[in-house]
Image (cartoon, rainbow, N blue to C red):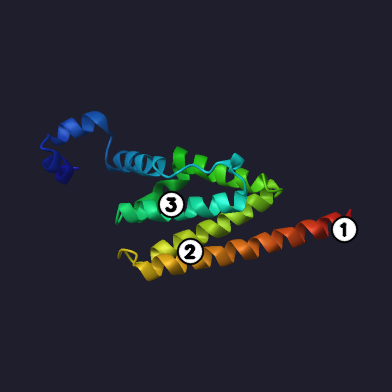
Amino acid sequence: MRSLSNELQVSVGALYKHVAGRDELMALVVEKVLDQVPRVTTGAGDGWLALRAHVLAMQAQMDRYPGLDGIVMEHSPKSPTANALRREGMAALQGEGLTSGQAHHVYRAVSWLWLGSRVALEGRPRRRADIDTFAESLDILISGLRAHMVTETVRAQEEI
């Protein structure tokens, strides 16, 4: 907080007049950054492609703010914006016929890929090869999950 107050040329007390402390400040930053991620729209056609576009946009957003991905990961579970993005992603998948549980499973798998890719960078900026490899990995994951969900649905219908 002291470094920030020096950078802004205000007193530390002035900062504390607006935020309770570092955690609240970081939460506000996360909300602002996540609010800039394009929303997942369910009426835009293929929910799987909408989820793909959303994840790629999230990666691009994290690239705009180097070093922030760890803070986003830390604050994401409590973030209203992150939770809204998650609900929208799952709704797009449910629009493709997935159950709530299946949509959660898919969203979680894609999230783990995204999170793992950020951690693997160890704080360094993504290179073109990283961006391309991530997009290819995301496509493979989504394709496999899509095929798996279709198979699972067919199996469930055969049991009925």
Q: Amino acid at mark 1?
A: Glu
Q: State the residue at coordinates (31%, 43%).
A: 26
Rendering coords of residue 82 (x, y %): 46, 44
Q: Which residue is mark 3?
A: 58
Residue farthest along the top direction in this orientation: 17
Asked whether disc 1 touches disc 2, contact meaning CB atoms under 8 Å apart, the reply is: no
16, 120: nearer the viewer: 120
| Three-letter amino acid code at the position of disc 3 | Met
Residue 10 position (above or below residue 44)? above
When the figure is inspected, residue 44 is found, relative to residue 116, above or below; the finding is above
Is 88 rendered above or below residue 67?
Answer: above
Give the residue at x 20% y 34%. 15
Q: CA distance from mark 3 to mark 1?
A: 38 Å
Using a 10 Å C-alpha cutoff, classify the residue at mark 3 as few (fewer than 14 neighbours), some (14 to 19) or many (20 or more).
some
Give the distance between the C-alpha atoms of the residues marked 3 and 2, in whole angstroms.
12 Å
Which of the 4 quarters of the picture holds residue 108? bottom right
Residue for point 34% across, 38% down: 28
Residue with the mark numbered 1: 158
Residue at 45 percent of width and 64 percent of height: 116
